Amino acid sequence: MAKIWLRRRLNELELFTVDVIYGRRAGAGTAVYGAFLQALSWLFSGITQARLWLYQRRILHDQPLGCLVVVVGNLTVGGTGKTPVVEKFARALRDRGRKVAILSRGYKSKSPPLWRRAWWALTHAEPPPPRVVSDGEQVLLDSEQAGDEPYMLARNLPGVVVLVDKNRVKAGEYAIRRFGCDTLVLDDGFQYLPLKGSLNLLLVDKTNPFGNGQLLPRGILREPIKHLRRANYIFLTKSDGRRDPELERLIAEHNPGADVIECAHRPQYLRRLGAPADDVEGRRPLEYLRGRRVLAFSGIATPESFEKFLRDLGATLVARERYLDHYRFVDEDFAELFALALREGAECLVTTEKDAVRISERVACPLPIYYLRLEIDILRGAGDFEEAVGRICFPAARAVRTTP
């Protein structure tokens, strides 16, 4: 019980910090805490810019791997809808005959036990190989061992290798040597400078491009906004199709040569938790939500966008529960969720696909649980996603610019 109590108190503190960052709280205590975070933010900014300066002056060296390396990332923490873009990019490259590997750091994945790492260090001269989430034929690790996004990508992308390692230079070399890959997609790699990218694709959430403009931990920026200049291509995600002259002016100010591609995340269907991928009965059309009483729950960076999707599809949200990004659910959470759903008269529970991979299929639920499947749709800057991939990744279609 003490462990559960401590876990919940830490969760509350993290949620409070997130609320301060996003300006959802007010009061004297919030102001003092915000000032403390601001001081840490100045320190973080100095470290970030010094590190980039060292790589630009070649004091620290990046490493080319002799193949196409597509870097997909963002300037902010979470919330840009990166995983669907990585998935669609990797699928399009695979379908064009490339041997693709996705390299991920496996954020919040469970490391091998200490005894196993110690045994490897004692019995091997070289560091351990990266964790193979998928060898292109089958998924070999679960979401806890692999991390949410790598597991989801491996499950949705047969024929694509997915590797997890904090050292993505090592992971890239392993993908080339072990699996014969000729194309590497570096997931969430904009800040990973040791591996030299052929192309930098930067994602910007159009609904909240740069938060309050502050760096971590006072804001959501990993790098200053001026580092937009490091991108070859900029994807504006979560667009509603309307132009944003101020955002376009800001991008042009810092990177006038970048190609801008605007896209939207479109809901596709609902799938019942635990239903096999080929189970037709486990899949519901979006019309299923119209007029239905729903409890929405999620552990993602921007739950507002997910909840808006449900409302726009006609669902009545009788309750909502928000958890930290990458929150790993336990049985007690579902006991509370089910009690709340029954109390509020919900007909079903709906979550995100990223959350669904962290839910045990052993969960006994008196109500159906569905996750919402999203995919990317190009609105401006290219005819469709396949054309965008051709323009970006194939020199015959378009000359590739080097990163400044």
Image (cartoon, rainbow, N blue to C red):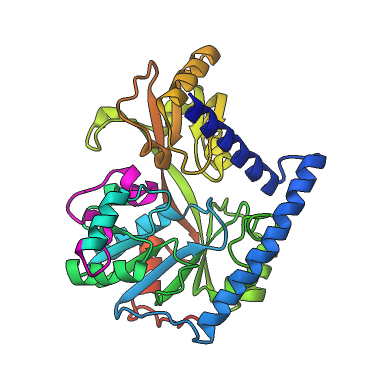
Residue at the image position 66 percent from the left and 55 percent from the top: 219
Q: Quadrant of residue 187?
A: bottom left
Residue 313, compared with residue 396, is above or below; it is above
Magenta region, residue range: 123-152
Res. 297 visible in picture: yes
Residue at the image position 52 percent from the left and 54 percent from the top: 80
Residue 67, compared with residue 295, is above or below; it is below
Horizontal side, residue 218 vs residue 304: left or right: right
Residue at the image position 52 percent from the left and 18 percent from the top: 340
The spot of residue 247 in percent (x, y) is 66, 63
Viewer-closest of 137 and 233: 137
The spot of residue 396 in percent (x, y) is 32, 81
Residue at the image position 23 percent from the left and 62 percent from the top: 122
Res. 245 visible in picture: no
Q: Quadrant of residue 216?
A: bottom right
The spot of residue 289 in percent (x, y) is 46, 27
Q: Quadrant of residue 27?
A: top right
Residue furthest front as drawn: 122
Horizontal side, residue 353 vs residue 304: left or right: left
Horizontal side, residue 231 vs residue 386: left or right: right
Viewer-closest of 267 and 214: 214
Viewer-closest of 288 and 182: 182
Residue 216, compared with residue 175, is above or below; it is above
Magenta segment: does it hold 350? no
The spot of residue 6 in percent (x, y) is 54, 32
Viewer-closest of 56 and 240: 56
Magenta segment: does it hold 131? yes
